[in-house]
Image (cartoon, rainbow, N blue to C red):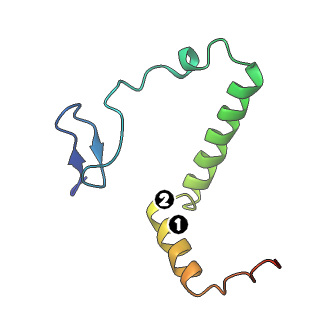
Amino acid sequence: MTGMWACPACGRSFANRNQVHTCAALGDLDRHFAGTDPLIRATFGAVLAAVARLRRRGQADGGWSAQRLRADSSSHTPPPKPCP
């Protein structure tokens, strides 16, 4: 992919120059969730599956979504201020 920036310390590639990240190895998810409630791991798995389905349909492109949200919010009328 062209235009990717690689961290000089860890070598990971990112779309944005100087992307905030940790240089630690990503590690194994099962080890990460070891000792937690199994429902937490199952919920994480369900979120990953939902994102994968959206990606297959072309609906989870973070760049497009962020641009769309900014465009939508710029024309959005702000909510009324709460009463004192």
Which residue is denoted by mark 1 in the rendering?
65
* SS for callout 1: helix
* x and y, in percent, of residue 44 in the image: 66, 34
Left or right of 37 on screen, residue 34:
left
Q: Amino acid at mark 2?
A: Gly
* x and y, in percent, of residue 50 in the image: 66, 46
Q: Amino acid at mark 1?
A: Ser
Q: Is residue 13 above or below residue 38?
A: below
> Which of the 4 image quadrants contains residue 54?
bottom right
Q: Between residues 84 and 20, which one lies in front from this camera angle?
A: 84
Query: Circle 2: is it few (<14), some (14-19), or many (20+) Cα within 10 Å?
Result: few
Q: Residue furthest top?
A: 35
Query: Circle 1: is it few (<14), some (14-19), or many (20+) Cα within 10 Å?
Result: few
| Residue displayed at 31% across by 30% down | 23
> Which of the 4 image quadrants contains residue 76?
bottom right
| Residue displayed at 30% across by 55% down | 16
| Residue displayed at 58% across by 46% down | 52
* SS for callout 2: helix
Left or right of 67 on screen, residue 53:
right
Q: Residue furthest left?
A: 8
* x and y, in percent, of residue 22 in the image: 35, 33
In 3D space, how far apart are the residues under numbered discs 2 and 1 (Cα atoms)? 5 Å
Which residue is denoted by mark 2 in the rendering?
62
Q: Between residues 49 and 13, which one lies in front from this camera angle?
A: 13
